[in-house]
Image (tube, rainbow, N blue to C red):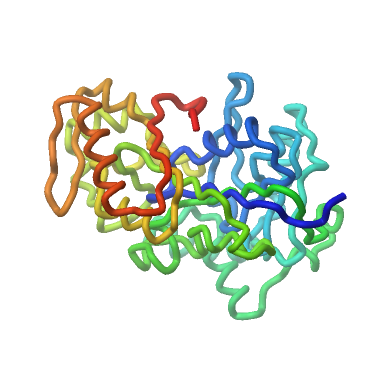
Amino acid sequence: MNNKIKTVDICFGLAWGDEAKGKIVAHLAKTKSYDFICRWAGGSNAGHTIYVDGKKYVTHLIPAGVFYNIPSIIGPDCVINENKFAEELVYLHSNGFDIDLIKVSSKCHVVLDKHINEDKASYATKLGSTSQGIAFCYKDKFGRTGTRAEDVPFFKKYLWDEKLHGDILCEGAQGFWLDINYGNYPYITSSTTLPYGACSLGFSPKLIRNIYGASKIYDTRSGVDPLFPPELLEDNELKQIATLGEEYGVTTGRPRIVNWLNLDMLIKAIAISGTTHVIVSKTDILEQVGVYKCKYKDNIITFDTLELIKEYIDNVIIENCPFVEKIVYSNNPHSVDL
């Protein structure tokens, strides 16, 4: 076996999560030859939807490699709850997937019941957290009082040897504007969602080949954020988009607040992250509603057709984001043509 890492591809969200990253990772896993698929941040506060042979599957912790017979690693900067992990193992095994492919970094911190209880008592209402105990687990990690997977007997059989080789795909959770540094603090997640965070898995950034950035053709936000005021829920056009787009959180089931695509924020996310491939999903939803709008330089711009808004988005991205090699639009939840 060649123990050298050859290349690393990264898929991450360019917005506030829920950007169809699962679909992109699934496509890459099917069509590329990856030796590992790895998750680098967050915990069961995330949710990825994968379609395999037309059947829908949802995971919150375990990377998508398990659906394609590829070793799936939960990395050292993730946090993991024993019960949630066990539930996913049972779910995947009962659906015929090989759970021996799933490994957990020994450095991964464990979400305990006390973390979940603290979360429910404070952040869930005030900041709109998912009540998964994520912030309080990270608080203990960085306070150097946390529990790691290597300290817990339950995880012993799942511990990863901390070695990678060949071609790697890294699977992001949440999105750029939920990042602990770049998001609308404190209405953010408690980990690094940007691609550079994937290097915590143990590879040089010089090995990164492609960065696949996921977006939708409209913006959505789960939880509390002053950038998405409740009055947006009363806008009839945005309500139609929310209904047709089935905009409910994968982890919580709560409605997402919808707004027009903010191109200022999108191009900033693309430029800072070094995204090479931009994937814009759910164009079919705007077609069904028959309304095409986006926001740029604090102005809402209206277009007559889907093609015109796509052309405008292309031009703005190309003008402002020199690392972008390809922009792809997707009109279905099952697949994407990269």
Q: Is residue 301 left or right of residue 90?
A: left
Residue 93 locus on image (x, y percent): 77, 33
- Count the marks: 0
Residue found at x 59% / y 77% = 142
Residue at 72% across / 34% down in the picture? 92
Find residue 63 and report its image quarter: top right
Near-viewer residue (256 or 334): 334
Q: Is residue 143 left or right of residue 240?
A: right
Percent x, y of residue 75: 67, 58
Residue 73 visible in the displayed image: yes
Residue 83 appears left or right of 14: right
Q: Nearer the viewer, residue 251 or 190?
A: 190
Q: Is residue 2 above or below residue 54?
A: below
**Left or right: where does residue 205 sit relative to residue 310?**
right
Residue at image point 66% right, 45% down: 62
x, y percent for residue 261: 26, 43
Q: Residue visible at 56% across and 73% down?
A: 139
Establish if 122 lies above or below 104.
below
Q: Position of residue 284 (x, y in %)?
A: 33, 24
Q: Is residue 110 visible?
A: no
Instruction: Check the image and report above or below for 270 versus 255.
Output: below
